[in-house]
Image (spheres, rainbow, N blue to C red):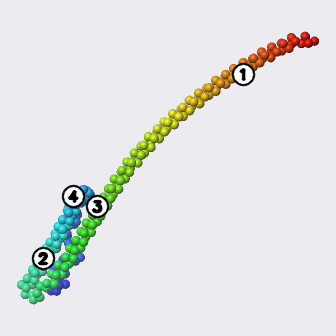
Amino acid sequence: MNSSQLKEENFVPENREIACPSLDSAVPNSGVKMLINENDGEAEHKEIESATKRIIELEKEKERIIVNCELLKTKLELVKSLESGIAISEFPCKDAEVICSYFEERIGDLHADIQHIRSRAFYYKHECKDLLKLAKLSKQESETLREELSRVTARESALKEELEMTRKSYEMQLQNLHEHIANLNARLDEQSKALNSFKDVFNGVTSTKQNSRKPLLK
């Protein structure tokens, strides 16, 4: 039995999906939620590092168990073959090295994935912090604009009231001026009538005097 037959018959194929705990189940939801809290940044960082190390250790332990299980299966088959009298070569150590290197590579890939996920988590954490700061600045700016709008509205109301008072004052002054002009016109009419009457009286007296003087001239 060579190494290729051993891998094909007794070991887990490379394309076979091995059930392993997902990252979501390994990291508690409380830890994920704590990423949002900016006040516990240092504690979150340490907790994530501890959880990452624990995940790596568990993955390595799991792969060691799988390797040992497969090796035990292979040895069991070798013992059965010896008992049946079939001559086989000594168990090659190279197969174990291949298995170990394979699973070590898998562990390295998992570790790289975890590092990538952790870096993305920190990226989004800082992104959320920036968004929170921007939201606070926008809120402050909105409050400032609201206060400015209130002041402008109050100023506009005051100007409207002042304009209304000025309009009413001008209307009253115009009305008084019209009344004064009407009184002046009435007085002028009376004076004109009195002057005309005086002229008529004066003209009548003059005519009488002239008529009385005519016989004397003859």
Q: Earlier in the sequence, mark 3 or mark 4?
A: 4
Residue under circle 2?
A: 68
Q: Could you tell me how many numbered marks the image carries?
A: 4
Q: How far apart are marks 3 and 1 (CA)?
A: 98 Å
The local secondary structure at tag 2 comes to helix
The kind of residue on which mark 3 rests is Lys
Q: In this view, does 68 lie to the left or right of 121?
A: left
Name the residue rendered at 67%, 25% in the picture.
185
**Residue 7 visible in the shown view:** no
Q: Between label 3 and label 1, give the one nearer the viewer.
A: 1
Q: Earlier in the sequence, mark 2 or mark 1?
A: 2
The kind of residue on which mark 4 rests is Ser
Please provide percent x and percent y for residue 78: 10, 83
Q: Which of marks 3 and 2 is nearer the N terminus?
A: 2
Please provide percent x and percent y for residue 195: 73, 19
Residue under circle 3?
A: 125
Q: Earlier in the sequence, mark 3 or mark 1?
A: 3
